[in-house]
Image (spheres, grey):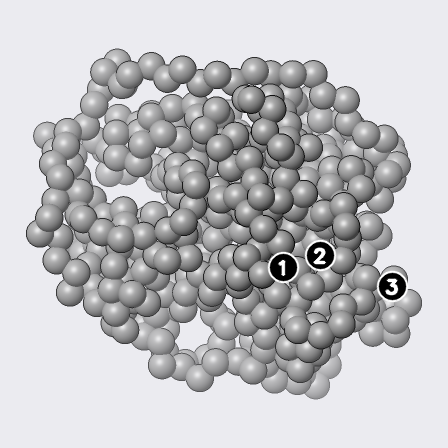
């Protein structure tokens, strides 16, 4: 067991005691490129009423931007994966709600993220809500209030605009707003999305579509097919079950039957992939210009499969891993000499949290870490940290994961490599907890100028809209 013997004691600060931050953020006017260039019909997307963050010192703009989102991945979900894989954690705390005393365990960051240039936290609260750092750590139930959903969070990260829960790529008035894949295409770059859940689910949708409801899966997939995206990969194959078994008849939940037929018949403008072998080949072989991949599974690559969910012993589906999809996507996108933007989601971390499945959680978070490792390797062998910016974060926390025996106080996760840590859950929904943020590579330091507050436990934090604003400011 990782023993929290070496600890630091602290005390919660009243917001009035928190030192004021000199942020150095300058807001600048921003003229969006003609929407017609983005692949979205001109009447549909209004210029965003936002101002990107001006980059201090005029940092060099990254050629490539890779945003990796662990859906539902709070600090404790990330540490659960670290404990299972390596026997170490990096952010474990015990907090006494009544006294404000904080005990911090000594720890080590997972190797996939240890070299990050910037390590912060992100505020994820829903549109119209605030976050009170002191209240978040003096009342155990505080973070159960005003959580965002994945649709609104993805929209905030992709467009820089907060919106209502359930909305995809539109502002609170239902006006479509330009997202980062469209901005990339408008500036001459390629763009794509990769996920371990259906391609038209909330997070990839927020980066690729404009719909009033996240439940409009088929319309979202059509938006993706009609776009100028170079890569769309994930689950949602109509002919396969959650156990990677062929159905007797198709279920067109995540895309229209007619759109699937266009993909299958090679009439969509994309090269269509489905088999594990085809994804494996794409990861290392010659790459077509555009790829639309639907792994042979219904809703998640692995999380929804049959078998035990409290441990990691269940036989895995014979489908491509998130890391393999990531390698394939990078193989397609790096053919563009002008660079690219890609969003890669470990989407089923959230699904495991909702179901309070500790075995599936450490699997899904571990698969996400493997995808991060694949990106690190690609940057160091095919690109460089001087031209590529990697961002790793989450859209929100879900499950309210803690160590055993929490509520009304907060307890630590502990464990050893190869064993699922002891843990407790306190909701089947989302929370408004701060989530981790890491940036590495080209212009990563720009995010330090976007800090908006100081949390007594998690330290300096951004708002989730800062991701789009900083990238737009750099580009």
Query: In the rendered structure, which disc, 3 or 2, sits on the residue that comes first in sequence?
Result: 3
Query: In the rendered structure, which disc, 1 or 2, sits on the residue that comes first in sequence?
Result: 2
- Mark 1 surroundings: few (<14), some (14-19) or many (≥20) residues within 10 A: few
**Could you say whether the residue bearing mark 1 is in a helix, strand or loop?**
helix
Residue 422 has which mark? Answer: none
The residue under label 2 is: 334
**Could you say whether the residue bearing mark 2 is in a helix, strand or loop?**
loop
- Mark 2 surroundings: few (<14), some (14-19) or many (≥20) residues within 10 A: some
Q: Is residue 218 visible?
A: no
- Which quarter of the figure is the C terminus placed in? top right
Give the residue furthest to the right.
Answer: 267
Q: Quadrant of residue 387?
A: top right
Residue shown at the point (57%, 55%) measured from the top left: 379
The residue under label 1 is: 382
Left or right of residue 64: residue 32: right
Left or right of residue 75: residue 387: right
Q: Mark 1 and mark 3: span between their CA atoms?
A: 30 Å
**Could you say whether the residue bearing mark 3 is in a helix, strand or loop?**
loop
**Contact? badges 1 and 3 (CB < 8 Å):** no
Of 220 and 117, the residue lying toward us: 117
Left or right of residue 318: residue 250: right
Could you tell me residue 408's position as x and y percent? 17, 41
């Amino acid at each position: 067991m990782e023993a929290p013997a070496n600890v630091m004691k602290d005390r919660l600060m009243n917001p009035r005691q928190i030192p004021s931050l000199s942020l150095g953020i300058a807001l600048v006017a921003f003229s969006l490129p003609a929407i017609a260039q983005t692949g979205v019909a001109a009447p549909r997307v209004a210029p965003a009423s936002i101002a990107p963050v001006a980059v201090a010192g005029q940092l060099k703009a990254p050629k490539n931007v890779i945003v990796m989102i662990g859906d539902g991945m709070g600090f404790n979900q990330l540490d659960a994966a670290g404990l299972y894989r390596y026997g170490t954690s990096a952010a474990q705390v015990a907090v006494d709600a009544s006294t404000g005393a904080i005990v911090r365990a000594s720890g080590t960051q997972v190797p996939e993220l240890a070299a990050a240039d910037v390590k912060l936290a992100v505020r994820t609260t829903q549109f119209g809500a605030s976050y009170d750092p002191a209240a978040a750590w003096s009342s155990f139930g505080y973070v159960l209030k005003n959580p965002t959903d994945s649709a609104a969070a993805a929209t905030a990260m992709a467009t820089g605009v907060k919106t209502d829960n359930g909305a995809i790529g539109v502002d609170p008035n239902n006006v479509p707003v330009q997202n980062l894949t469209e901005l990339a295409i408008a500036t001459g770059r390629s763009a794509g999305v990769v996920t371990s859940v259906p391609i038209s689910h909330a997070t990839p949708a927020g980066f690729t579509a404009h719909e009033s409801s996240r439940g409009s899966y088929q319309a979202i997939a059509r938006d993706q097919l009609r776009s100028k995206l170079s890569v769309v990969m994930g689950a949602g194959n109509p002919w396969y079950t959650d156990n990677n078994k062929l159905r007797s008849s198709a279920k067109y939940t995540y895309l229209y039957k007619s759109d699937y037929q266009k993909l299958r018949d090679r009439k969509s403008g994309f090269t269509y992939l489905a088999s594990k072998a085809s994804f494996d080949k794409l990861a290392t072989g010659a790459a077509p210009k555009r790829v639309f991949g639907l792994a042979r599974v219904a809703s998640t690559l692995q999380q929804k499969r049959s078998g035990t969910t409290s441990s990691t012993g269940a036989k895995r589906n014979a489908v491509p891993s998130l890391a393999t999809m990531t390698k394939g996507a990078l193989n397609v996108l790096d053919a563009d000499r002008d660079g690219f933007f890609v969003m890669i989601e470990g989407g089923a971390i959230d699904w495991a949290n909702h179901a309070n499945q500790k075995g599936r959680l450490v699997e899904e978070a571990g698969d996400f870490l493997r995808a991060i490792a694949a990106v690190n390797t690609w940057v160091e062998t095919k690109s460089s940290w001087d031209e590529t910016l990697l961002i790793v974060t989450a859209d929100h926390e879900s499950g309210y994961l803690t160590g055993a025996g929490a509520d009304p106080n907060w307890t630590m996760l502990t464990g050893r490599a190869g064993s699922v840590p002891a843990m407790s859950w306190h909701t089947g929904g989302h929370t408004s907890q701060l989530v981790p943020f890491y940036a590495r590579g080209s212009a990563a330091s720009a995010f330090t100028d976007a800090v908006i507050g100081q949390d007594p436990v998690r330290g300096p934090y951004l708002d989730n809209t800062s991701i789009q604003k900083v990238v737009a400011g750099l580009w």
